[in-house]
Image: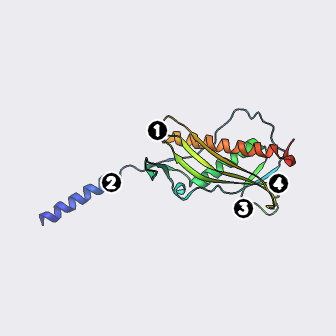
Amino acid sequence: MLVRVLLGCVCLLIMSCSSGPPPRQYLLEPVLDPVNESVPPVIDAVALAEVVVPAYASDQRIASRDERYQIKYDEKNKWADSPDEALTRVLANRLRYYLEASVIVEPWPRSYEPQVRIEVQFDKLLREATGGAEMSGQIRLISGDGKQMIDVRTFQFVRYANNLDPGAFYAAVAAGVNDISRMAAESLRKQTGFAN
């Protein structure tokens, strides 16, 4: 009987230690550039597909990798939204800024006739060793009717943070999304149908 009581106490002690405080959640906010010095392309309506992330990055926990290239998750810090939704929301915000156009996330109303459809797919989205973000992937610019590929741009960069606070990771991701938006706008600006 004494053994059962001791085992019960040990089990309760283990369970109480493992619960701990709830994980902190972080909201991805757009980078606010004070001045957009580039001339926006001539576009009124843009359709944005939901951003696609790798399976490991769709988890709400922050993903990074160890020295053996294995994915590890931060159990104490999480995205407040699902990563694909957060990235799509911030990307739409930045595209509105750089394109000075209406940007609607798919699905859009039947009466909406976009001139361009933008798709962004991440191949990599990881917290890197300094606390920043390592990102790579592809931007596809497609005609509004979906019949022509306008351009395909790849991106691969690391936004260093030099700060292991989880908030630094989200700031680095937001800066990376800003860069992706700028790349898409620049590509459209170079296309003859959208040049001023």
Query: Foreground mark, 2 or 1?
Result: 1
In the figure, is residue 79 to the left or right of 182? left
Q: How far apart are marks 4 and 1 (CA)?
A: 42 Å
N-terminal of the pair, mark 4 or mark 2, is 2
Query: Foreground mark, 1 or 3?
Result: 1
In the figure, is residue 108 to the left or right of 137? right
Q: Is mark 4 on a helix, strand or loop?
A: loop
N-terminal of the pair, mark 2 or mark 3, is 2
Q: How far apart are marks 2 and 1 (CA)?
A: 23 Å
Q: Distance between the residues labelled 1 and 3?
A: 37 Å
The structure residue drawn at horizontal position 59% and vertical position 53%, both measured from the top left corner, is 123
Q: What element carries label 3?
A: loop
N-terminal of the pair, mark 4 or mark 3, is 3
- Looking at the image, residue 172 lies above or below residue 55: above
- Looking at the image, residue 186 lies above or below residue 145: above
- Can you identify the residue that label 2 sits on? 18
